[in-house]
């Protein structure tokens, strides 16, 4: 990768969203993310912008109109708990609108030549949000709103999701969509229970869902093999105009909610390899999970540097672990399945 400039989408309202007392998806996560960006070697090449809110029509490409209305009224009247894991406060609706609009705003800015790639430091996250409901800390599906807008213009998109939790909402939204290739590397079996190897999409979208369900403890060796043998071949065959990254950093070995074995150094490699799937100016990363603040800061730093063309490893890559033989077998099975 050559050195590039980076758009960073941030807004004060993202700090105002609250998911509940002692909830892991807390405002302090965003402070750690911004500290990681500030520490990156490419920090002088960062161009900040305040994302605009998504419109109702833009949301309704992927969400039911009734859900949008219900969530607006729910927040307006004080908020509360939407499911056992997901909550909102009055400020959450505005935060969710801007989180969903951030990718759309970034697309327009990248098209205008303002920068070469974008990292969106948004809350709440999005990849679990379904068409008609919130789920798993997520209110609107941020990456899906952008992917659907691009597909509506006839552009081909690859969404690479390396959050430790499977992006069930994104998968469901694009289950039959041939223009959007959804690729997920995640811990399995694990929350939310989806993401098995044989979940491939349906109808015109058969084969455009690619799941690589990895065992707990999987390290960077397995992820790099997955990219070499599965992700890169299927993405190149799809010929994407854009790559959108569901950039969850909870696969880090220090994360309190998961059991995977990555380091910040591994996230540098994942970002570099993912960004290379689409041309300069057509690469956007959306913040998803990551709940250990120090690990999140280091991992975001590595990811932003890689997005900007600098392969910097704040931690060494992870050492091969005892579950990696099983992980290699999963990767080999995925490669066989998708080569057909």
Image (spheres, rainbow, N blue to C red):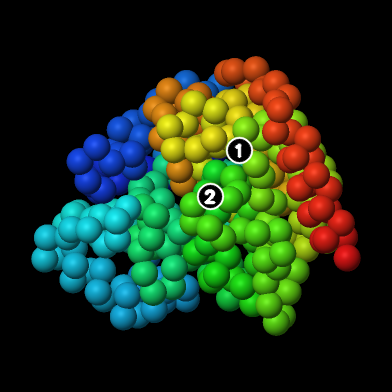
Mark 2 Cα within 10 Å, few/some/many (few <14, many 20+)?
some
Q: Name the one closer to the observer, 25 or 32.
A: 25
Q: Quadrant of the C terminus?
A: bottom right
Residues at marks 2 and 1 touching, judged by CB atoms closer than 8 Å: yes
Q: Name the one closer to the observer, 255 or 54.
A: 255
62 is higher (above) or lower (below) than 212: below
Q: Quadrant of residue 203?
A: bottom right
Q: Position of residue 337 (x, y in %)?
A: 83, 61
Residue under circle 1?
A: 216
Mark 1 Cα within 10 Å, few/some/many (few <14, many 20+)?
many
Tell me if residue 29 can be seen: yes
Residue under circle 2?
A: 190
Q: CA distance from mark 2 to mark 1?
A: 9 Å
Image side of residue 234 versus residue 170, left or right: right
Q: Position of residue 109 (x, y in %)?
A: 51, 53
The numbered mark, 2 or 1, whose residue comes first in the sequence reads 2
Q: Quadrant of residue 164?
A: top right
Q: Secondary structure at mark 2?
A: loop
Q: Quadrant of the N terminus?
A: top right
The residue depicted at 30 percent of the width and 46 percent of the height is 14
The residue depicted at 32 percent of the width and 75 percent of the height is 67
The residue depicted at 65 percent of the width and 41 percent of the height is 215
């Amino acid at each position: 990768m050559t050195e590039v400039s980076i758009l960073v989408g941030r807004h004060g309202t993202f700090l105002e969203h609250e998911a509940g007392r002692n909830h892991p998806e807390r405002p302090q996560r965003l402070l750690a993310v911004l500290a990681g960006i500030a520490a990156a070697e490419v920090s002088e090449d960062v161009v900040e912008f305040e994302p605009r809110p998504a419109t109702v029509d833009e949301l309704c490409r992927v969400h039911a109109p009734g859900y949008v209305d219900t969530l607006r009224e729910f927040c307006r009247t004080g908020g509360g708990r939407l499911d056992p894991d997901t909550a909102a406060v009055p400020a959450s609706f505005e935060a969710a609108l801007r989180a969903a609009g951030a990718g759309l705003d970034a697309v327009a800015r990248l098209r205008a030549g303002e920068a070469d790639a974008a990292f969106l430091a948004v809350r709440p996250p999005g990849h679990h949000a379904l068409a008609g409901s919130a789920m798993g800390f997520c209110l609107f599906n941020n990456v899906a709103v952008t992917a659907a807008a691009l597909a509506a213009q006839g552009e081909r998109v690859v969404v690479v999701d390396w959050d430790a939790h499977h992006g069930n909402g994104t998968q469901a939204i694009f289950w039959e969509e041939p223009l959007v290739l959804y690729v997920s590397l995640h811990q399995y079996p694990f929350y939310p229970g989806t993401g098995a190897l044989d979940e491939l999409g349906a109808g015109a979208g058969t084969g455009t869902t690619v799941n690589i369900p990895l065992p707990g403890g999987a390290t960077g060796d397995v992820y790099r093999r997955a990219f070499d043998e599965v992700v890169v071949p299927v993405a190149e065959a799809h010929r994407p105009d854009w790559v959108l990254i569901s950039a969850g950093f909870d696969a880090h070995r220090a994360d309190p909610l998961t059991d995977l074995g990555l380091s910040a150094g591994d996230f540098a490699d994942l970002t570099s390899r993912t960004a290379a799937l689409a041309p300069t100016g057509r690469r956007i990363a959306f913040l998803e999970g990551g709940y250990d603040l120090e690990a999140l800061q280091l991992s975001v730093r590595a990811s932003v540097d890689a997005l900007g063309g600098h392969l910097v490893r704040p931690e060494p890559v992870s050492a091969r672990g005892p579950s990696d033989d099983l992980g290699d077998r999963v990767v080999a099975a995925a490669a066989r399945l998708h080569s057909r």
